[in-house]
Image: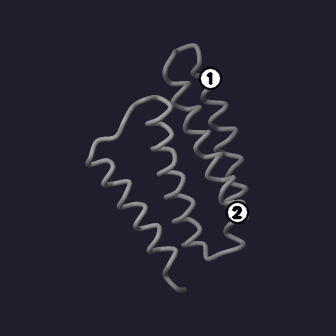
């Protein structure tokens, strides 16, 4: 549950940062909103570290937040991803799966 909330908060933070960067008058609101969600989500990451191997936790949470943020930014702001970028997304996802499958 903590991983899901962490990932959601990280995606929301990235959406705030992008939204705030689009228009001069929204910069501070985007900065504050992004940091509110991004900074406070680190508390959840610390909870995840308690419940699993920290290397796996960081790989899943870091990689997952990156992947989901890429997809959310592409959809919400219609930025799209090239074929090569989709390949990168797939490679990161595969790496996350391999990391989660490894035994420690």
Q: Secondary structure at mark 1?
A: helix
The residue nearer to you, when weighing 93 against 25, is: 93
Q: Secondary structure at mark 2?
A: helix
Q: Quadrant of residue 95?
A: bottom left
**Residue 63 badge:** none
Proximity of marks 1 and 2: CB atoms separated by less than 8 Å: no
- Tag 1: Cα neighbours inside 10 Å, few (<14), some, or many (≥20)? few
Q: How many marks?
A: 2
- Left or right of residue 8, residue 68 in this image: left
Q: Position of residue 79 (x, y in %)?
A: 39, 31
Q: How is the image coloured?
A: one colour
The residue nearer to you, when weighing 72 against 32, is: 72
> Which residue is found at the position 55% from the left and 32% from the top?
17
Q: Position of residue 14 (x, y in %)?
A: 55, 38
Which residue occupies the extreme top position in the image? 25
- Tag 2: Cα neighbours inside 10 Å, few (<14), some, or many (≥20)? some
> Of callouts 1 and 2, which one flags the residue occurring earlier in the amino acid sequence?
1
Q: Is residue 37 above or below residue 22?
A: below
| Alpha carbons under labels 1 and 2: distance apart | 27 Å
Which residue occupies the extreme left position in the image? 84
Q: Position of residue 27 (x, y in %)?
A: 57, 22
| Pointer 1 residue | 28
> Which residue is found at the position 61% from the left and 52% from the top?
7
Q: Is residue 37 above or below residue 26?
A: below
Q: Position of residue 97 (x, y in %)?
A: 47, 70
| Pointer 2 residue | 46
> Which residue is found at the position 47% from the left and 51% from the top?
67
The quadrant the C terminus occupies is: bottom right
> Which residue is found at the position 58% from the left and 43% from the top?
11
The quadrant the N terminus occupies is: bottom right
């Amino acid at each position: 549950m903590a991983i899901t909330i962490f990932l959601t908060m990280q995606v929301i933070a990235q959406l705030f940062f992008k939204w705030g960067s689009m228009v001069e008058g929204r910069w501070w609101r985007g900065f504050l909103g992004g940091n509110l969600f991004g900074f406070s989500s680190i508390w959840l990451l610390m909870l995840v570290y308690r419940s699993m191997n920290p290397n796996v936790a960081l790989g899943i949470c870091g990689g997952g937040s990156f992947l989901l943020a890429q997809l959310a930014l592409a959809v919400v702001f219609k930025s799209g991803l090239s074929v090569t970028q989709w390949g990168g997304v797939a490679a990161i996802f595969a790496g996350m799966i391999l990391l989660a499958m490894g035994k420690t």
